[in-house]
Amino acid sequence: MLRNYLKVALRNTANQKLLSLINIFSLAFGIAACLIIFLFIQDERSFDAFHAKQDQLYRLNEVQSFPGTNTQHVALSMPGMGPNLQKDYPEVLNFTRYWTRGKRLFEKGDTRLIVEEVVGVDSTFLELFDFRLLDGDAATALDEPYSIVISEETAKKFFGGGKAMGESLVMNGKPYKITGIAENVPENSHLQFDVLLSIPTVTRDDPGFNEQFGSNYLVTYLLLDPAADVKALESRMPEFLSRYMPPDDNTGQDVNDFYKLYFQPLPDIHLASMEVEHDYQNYRKFNGAYLDIFAIVGLFILLIAAVNFMNLITARASHRWKEVGVRKTMGALKGQLFSQFAVESALLGVFAFILAMAISVAFTPLLNQVAGRTLSMAYFLGHPLNLALAFLFTLALGLLAGVYPSYYLASYRTVNILKGGDVKSKKSVFRSALVVLQFGLAIAMIVSTFTVVQQLRYMKNKDIGLNKDHILLVDMNEEANTAFETMKKELLKSSNIKGVTASGQRLGNNFHQWGFKLKTDSIFGMTPSNVNVDYDYLDVYEIKLKQGRKFSRDYATDKDYAFIINESLAQELGLEDPIGISAGHSWYPDDSLGTIIGVSEDFNFNSLHHDINTLAMVVHPDWGYDELSVKLEGGHIEAAIRDVERVWAELVPSWPFRYTFLDEHFEELYRSDQQMEAVVAIMAALAIFIACMGLFGLAAITVEKRTKEVGIRKVLGASAAQIVVQLSKNFALLVLLAFIVFSPLAFWAMNRWLENFAYRIEVSPLAFLLGGFLALAIALLTVSVHTLRSARVNPAEVLRSE
């Protein structure tokens, strides 16, 4: 029986080639889109899943609520927190700290290389996290000072294929013994490192390191007892803070007014940390809400493809009524007919699956290029179980999509069929509803794509209060700081360079927050963002002053004792004219404060996901600068870069010249948003394409059924244009209905997404006009292919048999 079903299914598929191909291709594209989106989502959700203790590991985060600044979540904590939490609370089984040390220059003989990710960690790090050692003992590798664990890639850079274990690398003139070689860190780890330093090395001259409270500059991970009540433990953190940071004797302020500790589960860190600041170690951090959007997009596309499948199978029934009637007359049972049509649906699903796998293999590299990933269909092709599950899913989808058509065909009354009665019934209403659903989803995706593009364009072009164009950035080391003034003079001799400055932190990153106090009638404190800058910082970045003056070498006190605050901080102070007010960092003696000399207009020193925070700028060269900023002449970029490289090589021979541009750095802040834009745009185009394939097939069937009607209309004098309008208007009405129903849903969804931004556009009516117009135009163009052909047919040929 099954063999007969298959023969009939293959024969019917061959007899209706166009509709069969449309059915197979539309379902295949829908399945392929879902497979690729699934790969993307699976890759993002796989972060940190390889750690055996992932369900017990937590990152210690803080909520900071300081006067004069926005409340923020931070990933940083204090050095003394980990050791004392383990000592005081039995639920805390172990801890490790992760102290990012940035780029460092290492040497081995004549080989001198900058290593990107150098991190200080406790000896327990390799016990809590499962970063596999190719050589060395994870339990003891980081016990001793001046011991390091290096990655496999780092070992190859310095030693080629030779022995690295037990050898030494030199950093800052001191040898560090290699006590472990780690397998390269997986891409799906939020922690990335090239060299691990033992924390006893970093803190060798600081015996009180484990008792330090007050400054947050490292990350703490806790291993909790599996039976621990995490919420109950969190509720005891205020007493912990009070124990180690008692109220200030002078002010009586409670530390719990400013800090709240909470535990973030390791599996949540990659996707649920968009609101967490100072999250420097979180590699490839991604907005988990976008995964939900991608999943919905994938579901929409699959739904559109499934709707096509149902619609076309139902529409093809017009060719099968007599077959059904004859089979029933010959004694075929309803169940047998149902099985026959279900097998045909399943067979089309099998063909669609084979094609979907080929499409996925071909298009996965495109997604990798667009989204910056390394996804591979090996997840399916290399794992028989995953492949089998995908196949069964497709088969089930084909069967489910064919359930209604199969049931409908099998249940129609034989007498009506054989009498040649009307077979419209309710199926035309059902098909119309499916067309509305298809184009409604497509319109929603067009609106979403337009809104995402407009928001990203707005962020890219918004005036952020400073000039970020043609700014070359170079990381500075100690030698560069020593030579800075000489370097600046030499660089400014070049006609290709317009300005030079330096700062303690890069724009676009979270500036550090330090205690800051002001003296009016009394002394009071706050904690704004702070940045150490060179005298010409405001000029190079074209930051405008609202009041007062800029930093100047003509005033001796401008070094260390002059402050320029931003407009937000001035407003927080509640002073119309803060110029001349005594101010200083929290460690300045009350009788040796500096002075506020200027108020700058607000500028966005972070991404536009965040509001502008309060800010204080100070010139303090003795602290050292981390970032050299060189403003280049727009028309001579390459020549200017060569000038900077030449001067750098002369004055900073110990540190390789490597640069980036500030505008590129700012674009990186919106990487996940840009990836969402690209993915949604591609999927919206695919959704329209699939919907049009279905409409093309449906129009072919509709026009074929109305051929005689067209002939009669032509005999009665109707023009080709009138016939096209007559045959197309029903489809146009369906698209209009889809627009009315789905536009409010798209409006709601896009407003929810825009809530992620502090600076945002409003959803534009133009997006809906564009979505509706495109959907209508594409639908009419698709239908017109058939209607025009039908309108040009000689009515004599159509009506010859009448």
Image (cartoon, rainbow, N blue to C red):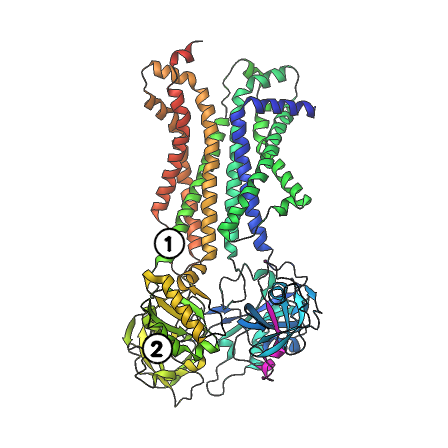
- Alpha-carbon neighbours of circle 2 within 10 Å: few (<14), some, or many (≥20)? many
> In the picture shown, does residue 413 fall above or below 654?
above
- Asked if residue 224 can be seen in this view, the reply is no
- The residue drawn where x is 70% and y is 73% is 140
Amino acid under disc 1: Arg
Q: Quadrant of the N terminus?
A: top right
Query: In which image quadrant can residue 584 be found?
Result: bottom left
Q: In which quarter of the image is the C terminus?
A: top left
Label 1 and label 2: CA atoms lie apart by: 33 Å
Amino acid under disc 2: Tyr
208 drawn magenta: yes
Residue at the far top in the pictured view: 801
710 drawn magenta: no
Query: In which image quadrant can residue 755 be found?
Result: bottom left
The segment highlighted magenta reads: 186-212
Helix, strand, or loop for circle 2? loop
